[in-house]
Amino acid sequence: MNLFPDLRFPVDEDEWMDTRGFDPDRNRRALRYLAFTNRRFGGARAILRPLSLWSRRWHPGEPVHLLDVGTGGADIPIAIAQWGRRRGFSLRITAVELPAPIAALAKEAARPCPELTVLPRDLRDMPQELTFDYVTASLFLHHVPVGLRAEALRAMDRRARKGLVISDLRRGLLPYWAAGAASVVWGDSVLRHDSPLAVRRSFRKDELESLARETGLAYLRARKESWFRLSLSGEKA
């Protein structure tokens, strides 16, 4: 791990998790690590904060349908389902993930959540007419090649009738060091490679703002979240 990489721009180097095939033990370990960091270091909070704000306008018993893109191990939609259950909301959550073996692990994790359906799908392959009240994505956008991120954001916006919330990593030296240290503690060679690289692939706040402008999605606002996270979220008028 280079202690002082060039962080001025995001890199397009592939993470090993995306390119080295499926190994059940390795992938379960990586998904547990991601779930732990989302739970303890602000990933789930960055998604739930805007949903909690918007839910003030939801009517009792009103069905609310959400789509979670690039769900990984489904820890984020599970957190949303548990949050909604505690508040008495009628949520239906669809979570999509590829490759199919990762989706199978997510489906296994989602068994205790009857309101959650996991599908082995790419967002681009879903029927164009299929839309949802809200679309969420956590730690997904930095996996998209830099040149395709605007297209990915537009695709998520087209699926969202009411609002969109994205959470991802903030690129910087402290987040890079923190990711490296956490992955060493976790003790996995893939994570030791991918965690610092994920930070290098990720965003600065002004880059998310520029992405929203580039795509014409003026309702979206970028925000710094705790523990080196960023969010891009907004509710449509």
Image: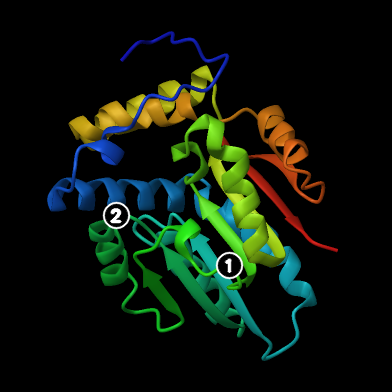
Residue 93 can be seen, yes or no: yes
Q: Which residue is mark 2?
A: 99
User: Which of the two marks, 1 or 2, is nearer to us in this view?
Assistant: 1
Badge 1: few (under 14), some or many (20 or more) residues near its Cα, within 10 Å?
Answer: few
Residue lying furthest bottom: 61
Q: Estimate the x, y position of residue 136 in percent, counting from the top left.
A: 57, 59
* Image quadrant assignment for residue 106: bottom left
Q: Estimate the x, y position of residue 190 in percent, counting from the top left.
A: 22, 33
Q: Residue at x 36, y 32 (%)?
A: 195
Q: How many marks?
A: 2
Q: Nearer the viewer, residue 149 or 33?
A: 149
Q: Which residue type does callout 2 highlight?
A: Pro
Badge 2: few (under 14), some or many (20 or more) residues near its Cα, within 10 Å?
Answer: some
Classify residue 191 as left or right of residue 159. left
Classify residue 74 as left or right of residue 229. left
Q: Nearer the viewer, residue 45 or 73?
A: 73
Q: Residue at x 34, y 26 (%)?
A: 181
Q: Nearer the viewer, residue 145 or 140?
A: 145
Q: Which residue is mark 1?
A: 128
Classify residue 219 as left or right of residue 73. right
Locate the N terminus by quadrant: top left
Mark 1 vs mark 2, CA separation in Å: 21 Å
Q: Using the image, determine if residue 43 lies above or below residue 93.
A: above
